[in-house]
Amino acid sequence: MKYISTRGGMTPQGFSDILLEGLAPDGGLAVPEIIPVVSREQLESWRALPYHALAAEVLSLFVSDIDRPTLEQLTRKAYSTEVFQSEDIVPLRPLYDGMSLLGLSEGPTLAFKDMAMQFLGQVFPYVLNKRGATLNILGATSGDTGSAAEYAMRGKDNVSVFMLSPDGRMSAFQRAQMYSLQDPNIHNVAVKGNFDQAQDIVKALASDLAFKAKWHLGAVNSINWGRIAAQVVYYFHGWLRATTTADQQVSFAVPSGNFGNILAGHIARKMGLPIRRLILATNENNVLEEFFRTGIYRPRDADHTFVTSSPSMDISRASNFERFVFDLVGRDAERVSALWRELGEKGYFDLSAYQSEFESKYGFLAGASSHESRLATIRSVMDRTGVLIDPHTADGVKVAAQYVEPGIPMLVLETALPAKFSEVIEEALGYPAPVPLGLEDLESLPQRVTVLPCEVDAVRAYITEHARV
Ligand SMILES: *Cc1c(COP(=O)(O)O)cnc(C)c1O
C-alpha cells in the first residue's frame, strides 16, 4: 500500500513515511493510492472479533510496512480494557426511533480523539524505534486533541509532547486533565493569547525548516493519515454490532468539525462496508452543511467563527475536506490544486456541478444545529431514555432524527462524554453531569504548566531547552 498526495506532487510512499510527516511536500494531503475493498465474506468472518483484532484486520489493509504480528501487538495495547472503560471498547447503546449511540468516548480523555490517538501512541514509538529516531510533537489545542495526544504519548521514551493551550480559556476539567500529567516527556505550555494565536506560533515554528529538522518536530493534527485509518475501524465495528447479516445497511450520523471523523466513514463506505447514509452534523459553524446543501465551499475567517456550546466543532476551515474533494472530482490532483488556488484567491469554490452525486453516489446528507436545539435534544434524550449525552453528540442526534429511515439502524457517533462539558448540561437540565468513576479528584490534583508570553521566540527558546534529542 502506497500513499500519494491529493495535489499530485509526491512520489508514492509507505505508511510509516507519511505517518511522521504533516502536509505532503506539495501542500496536499496523503491518501491511499488505491482504496482496499473488503468482500462480504471477509466482513462476515470479522463478526466475532474483539475490537483490537478487528483493528489489526482493518489497519493491515492500509499498513504494508509493519508486519502482521507487530500490528496485532500494537492494536492489542492501544485498545485494551486497561485504557478504555468499556469491555467492548466501543459500546453500542439503543436510544429510540431506530437510533443508537456508538460510544467512542470510553478512552482516558472522554472524547473520540482517543480512538485514533491511542493507536498513534503505539505506532509512533514503534516506527521511531525502528529508525533510531526521536520526535518532539508540537501542537496547539483548545481542548480535546491536546489531552488525547498527551495521554497517548505519556511515558514514551522516544517522543516528547509540547502542547500549547490558550491560558485561562479551557474549562476547569480540560485544564485539570492536561495539566495534572506529571510525566517528564509531557510539556504543557499555556500562552497568553487565544487558540488561533497559539496555532500561529505552531505554524511559524513548523515552517522554520531548519528549526524543525534540528529538533525533530512532528505533529499529530487531524490531517494525520494514521488517525484517519484508525478511525475507519469503528465504522466496521459499529456495522458489525448493529447487523446480523452482510446484506444489511446502516447509516451513521457524525458531529463534525475538521471532517476527520466522517472522512473515515467515507473511506469505510468506499471499502464496501454497507453504509447507506453518512449524515454530517455541524453546529452554528455550518460551512460544511452549506457545502452539502449548495455545492459551494466558503470557509470563514476567525472573526466569523462563532463560539458555541459544542466548542470542539467550532471550526470553519475543515482540514480533511480536501481528501473528500479529491474523490469527488474523480481523484484528479490537478483539479484539486486548481480548486485550492481558487480558494486562496476568491475565498470560495463552487462544486455545485457535482451536487447530484453527494447523496446518490457518496451517501452524504447534512444538517446544522443551534444552541436551543442542542439543549432541547439533551433534555429529550434524557426524558425518553434516561441517557445523558454531551452537546456535540446532541448535535448528531438532532440532525440524525431528521433522516431516520424505517428498517435502517441509525448510529450516532458519541464524540464526547457529558462530564467534559458540564456547564452546558447544567444549562439544559438544571444539574451538572456526573463525574466519571476515578476522576472525582481530578481538579484538585497538582498541576504542571509553564506560562509563556504569546510569542514565537519564547516558545522557540522553551523547546530548545526541553526538547528530546
Ligand atoms: C474533534 C471533535 C469533533 C469533530 O471531529 P472532526 O473529526 O474534526 O470532524 C466533534 N466532537 C468532539 C467532542 C470532538 O472532540
Image (cartoon, rainbow, N blue to C red):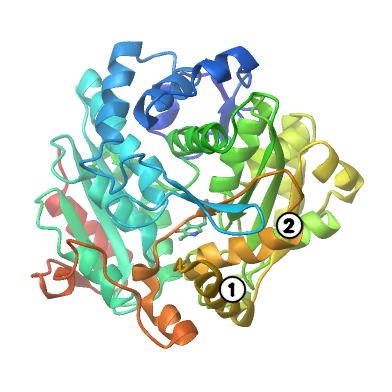
Q: Earlier in the sequence, mark 2 or mark 1?
A: 2
Horizontal side of 419 relative to 341 (left or right) equals left
Q: Which class describes the residues within 10 Å of circle 1: few (<14), some (14-19), or many (20+)?
A: many
Disc 2 marks which amino acid?
Ala
Asked where in the image residue 135 lies, by quadrant, the reply is top left
445 relative to 226 in the view: left or right: left
Quadrant of the image for the C terminus? top left
Pair 2/1: label in front: 1
Identity of the residue drawn at 42% across and 45% down? 91
Q: Quickly name the residue at label 2.
A: 366
- Residue 353 in sight from this viewpoint: yes
Q: Nearer the viewer, residue 242 or 368?
A: 242
Dots 2, 1 in contact, CB < 8 A = no
Residue at the image point whose x is 66% and y is 32% from the top: 269
> Considering the numbered disc 1 on the image, is that residue within a helix, a strand or a loop?
helix
Where is mark 1, residue-wise? 377
Q: Residue at x 41, y 31 (%)?
A: 19
81 versus 107 height, above or below? above
| Mark 2 closeness class: few <14, some 14–19, many ≥20 residues within 10 Å | many
Q: Position of residue 211 (x, y in %)?
A: 30, 45
- The image position of residue 273, as x and y in percent, is 64, 28
Q: CA distance from mark 2 to mark 1?
A: 17 Å
Q: Is residue 410 above or below residue 228?
A: below
SS under mark 2: strand
| Residue type beneath disc 1 | Thr
